[in-house]
Amino acid sequence: MNDNMTEKIVTRFAPSPTGFMHVGGVRTALYAWLFAKKNNGTMILRIEDTDKEREVEGSIEHIIKSLKWLGITWDEGPDIGGPNAPYLQSQRLDSYKKYAKILVEKGLAYADPYSEEELEIFRKKAEEEKRPFLFRDHRPLNPPAWDGTQPLRLKIVNAEKTKWHDLVRGDLEAGPEALDDFILVKSDGYPTYNFAHIIDDLLMGVTHIFRADEFISSTPKFIALYNALEIKRPEFVTLPPIMGPDGKKKLGKRDGAKDILDYQKEGYLPEAVINFLSLIGWNPGGEKEIFSVDEIIELFEIEKIHTGGAKFNEDKLLWTNKEYIKNKSDIDFIKEIKERNPRKDLTLDGIEKIVPIVRERIAIWSDISLMWQNGELQFFFEKPIYEKALLLPKGTNDNSVTAKHLLKVKEILENNVDWSAESIKNDLWDYASEVGRGNVLWPLRTCLTGRDKSPDPFTVAEVLGKTETLSRVGEAINQLNI
């Protein structure tokens, strides 16, 4: 057990408000939240909004809405406050200035006096000499006093190999070329990410940092800053990348990664999305694939986070959601069926009878909307309108023969007393087998639904009820005899 596990666990999710939330960011928040919940710790939501050029209006609200939809909660944050407020970096500039001055006073930070043109000359020379450009090779001997109008850089005192331990990746290291005098505070007065997040984590008591693998290359810089400030560094928890469906490259916004709230609009259940995302890069062991949120919290361990990338398989997400949605209550289904009905003039008497039919056919709530749009539900609530030719089985054109079969069906069903799909099928099966099932079941299906594709006619008849079923069969017979 590491030293930090003996103190109160504090994790954070610190996104930049630069656009919509996609699965990569959400999974980072999810793992940080799971670990805090598992260990009775604290989860902080912090907004890293110091890059004003890239900030997108409404992103902060979007981040909060996305996490709340999924049920990922936080104990401190911009919307609820907390002992470490404020939680927007743009409102914490005094803290960064304080620590910047400490570094200046220690001789470990200095004002960058160069213009962009001068830096470009240095870069071109390094390129001509076929060597990496390092700012520390051009460190000014007598830098000006830092007054906030120039960039402030960290002075790398010992450019040597950096070693560190990651709770997922194990022992890592990088050569001295990974270290350079990087900018702490920009000329506009805003801190860089490399500086601000370290000060915030220090002041907020963060013990474990969950982040993407793209930050591994920057870790030597972070460690140099921890050392310069003489502060204890948190534990690093590097998450595996989420790969695209082909497994060849990371899934990103440019590669079709969707806004997480698009899944909400499509009718995915938040608990299904949580279940699915938790298993991209983490596995509790065993063959089980469906877990409640409480089970995931109980089982979550950093030691079981994978190092290799995992594919984002939307078909698997759809399957996961179907497993959840089929267990939703009849009340939930009735609510969704009603709300998604485009025909507000349609009276939905007996709506509870179609719940089993809808339940077995959908994977997400928006599938109900498609069922309405495709005419797969209306016939349960109003008589269908169809061409007489639809009643004729394929390969036949004799109206009188089909009318004769439907008349026999009507006679048989008039004597049915149980009126269940099973009893209706049992009553009709011998006759249908005798004269050809298609000759009986096709016209029965189409006269009840007006469609060539629908649930089986026995199930439809049960839902419609005996009176309505006999009425529709009778009307079909009349049409065929005209």
Image: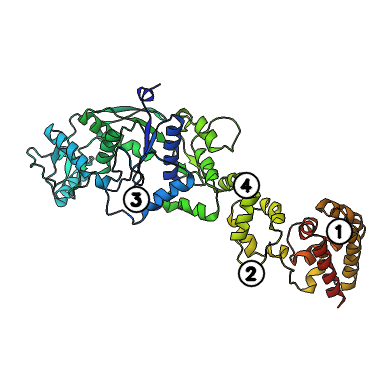
Q: Quadrant of the N terminus?
A: top left
Classify mark 1: helix, strand or loop.
helix
Lower sequence index among marks 4 and 3:
3
Residue kind at label 4, given as amino acid type: Lys
When asked about the image quadrant of residue 164, the answer is top left
Report how far apart the C-alphas of labels 1 and 3 lie in the structure.
62 Å
Specify which label sits upstream in the sequence, 2 or 4.
4
Cα–Cα span, label 4 and label 3: 34 Å
Q: Name the front one of labels 2 and 4.
A: 2
Residue under label 3, please give it: 17
Q: Residues within 10 Å of mark 3 (few under 14, many from 20)?
A: many
Looking at the picture, how far across and down is residue 285, in whole percent? Answer: 56, 30
List the residue tagged with mark 4: 328
| N-terminal-most mark, 1 or 3 | 3
Q: Residues within 10 Å of mark 1 (few under 14, many from 20)?
A: some
Decide: few, some or many residues near mark 2? Use Cα within 10 Å; few <14, some 14-19, many ≥20.
few
Q: Nearer the viewer, residue 119 or 208?
A: 208
What's the mark number on residue 345?
2
**Horizontally, is 481 left or right of 354 in the view?**
right
Out of 160 and 265, give the one closest to the viewer.
265
Label 1 is placed on what type of residue? Arg
> Can you say whether 92 is above or below 297 in the image?
below
Q: From this viewpoint, is residue 70 visible?
A: yes
Q: Quadrant of residue 438?
A: bottom right
Counting residues from the N terminus, which is met first, the one under dot 1 or under dot 2?
2
Q: Earlier in the sequence, mark 4 or mark 1?
A: 4
- Determine which residue is flagged by label 1: 437
* Colour mapping: rainbow
